[in-house]
Image (tube, rainbow, N blue to C red):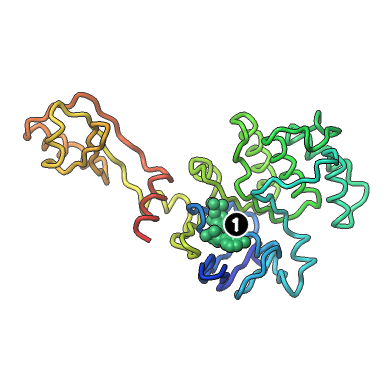
Amino acid sequence: MNPPAIRVVAASKRYGSLQALAGVDLEVAQGEFFGLLGPNGAGKTTLISALSGLARPDGGVFEIMGYNVVSDYRKARRNLGVVPQELVFDPFFSVRELLRIQSGYFGIRNNDDWIDEILENLDLTAKAGANMRMLSGGMKRRVLVAQALVHRPPVIVLDEPTAGVDVELRQGLWQFIRKLNRDGHTIVLTTHYLEEAEALCGRIAMLKSGKVVALDTTENLLRRFASHSLAVRLDRPELAAATGGVLAANGWAEFPLDRYDDLEPLLARLREAGAKILEMRVGEADLERVFVEVMSRA
Ligand SMILES: Nc1ncnc2c1ncn2[C@@H]1O[C@H](COP(=O)(O)OP(=O)(O)OP(=O)(O)O)[C@@H](O)[C@H]1O
């Protein structure tokens, strides 16, 4: 049987009195597009650092494609490509030099065909000869993605890869990552852009204070946690509370709506209370609402 792309059992890590990871269990199957979400400080980067062997955890087991990241470090590392959150580069190398050096770390020579393909897909071909210090922040971030891919790792972990990348390039980046996923690469993504996670990830884990507080398919999370809602602007906003709504600061009243069948009775209730609807919109379930709900319950 295929080993999981990533297996984490009982991961723990403490920084002084702060428990950054408090017993995380996680398994990502080969070929998945997996989202790792959580508020700032939830422990996502700590988990990724432990997986890539950069941070030493206090306890737990970490495996990449069945290889233990401590006892089988070289094989585990070879199977993993990490796009880190921080932009750290040697400013004196050109993009191509940097990618050749990175290939060398993995003992790969004559890698230019693959490097060219990566540069092309990341829209960096024109910058291949440019020194790193001459690139914009968004371009540097794309070089980080390129760097993670030089050794064709089957498992790719991206820690907020689109922070600071403009909309057009972000879409190009996703197209490329999707293609890698279609070609069989396992993708693990952390992002604060929840609509991106919703569109891309088949399964999602949500982390809070070093613990997994939700883990399911994106579809199930949307179905289980988030309901629809009806937002209305009433001629007499004070009637919102009496009819089961919550009045927001912008003057709109919001009503939970689990099913569309509930819409008609709600409108009748408003009519009977003597409220006239001036404007109305139905809010669909989305991952942002799920996230807020999960975090407030956990
Ligand atoms: N080297 C360190 N020394 C001390 N504390 C640390 C260190 N690295 C991380 N932490 C703390 O561990 C916790 C988890 O941090 P981590 O970077 O893993 O969170 P994150 O989920 O990646 O957050 P973000 O979304 O902001 O990237 C935070 O409270 C952070 O302050």
Q: Position of residue 114 (x, y in %)?
A: 84, 43
Tag 1 secondary structure: helix
Label 1 is placed on what type of residue?
A: Thr
Q: Looking at the image, which is closer to me, 144 or 232?
A: 144
Query: What residue appears at the point 57 percent right and 50 percent down from the top-left corner?
Result: 190
Horizontal side, residue 103 vs residue 6: left or right = right
Q: Which residue is mark 1?
A: 45
Horizontal side, residue 180 vs residue 60: left or right = right
Residue 43 in sight from this viewpoint: no
Residue 276, picture quadrant: top left
Q: Position of residue 26 (x, y in %)?
A: 55, 65
Horizontal side, residue 15 vs residue 154: left or right = left
Residue at disc 1, CB closer than 8 Å to ligand 1: yes
Query: What residue appears at the point 62 percent right and 50 percent down from the top-left corner?
Result: 159
Residue lying at the far front in this picture: please name it. Answer: 16
Query: What residue appears at the point 11 percent right and 30 percent down from the top-left corner?
Result: 275
Residue 228, picture quadrant: top left
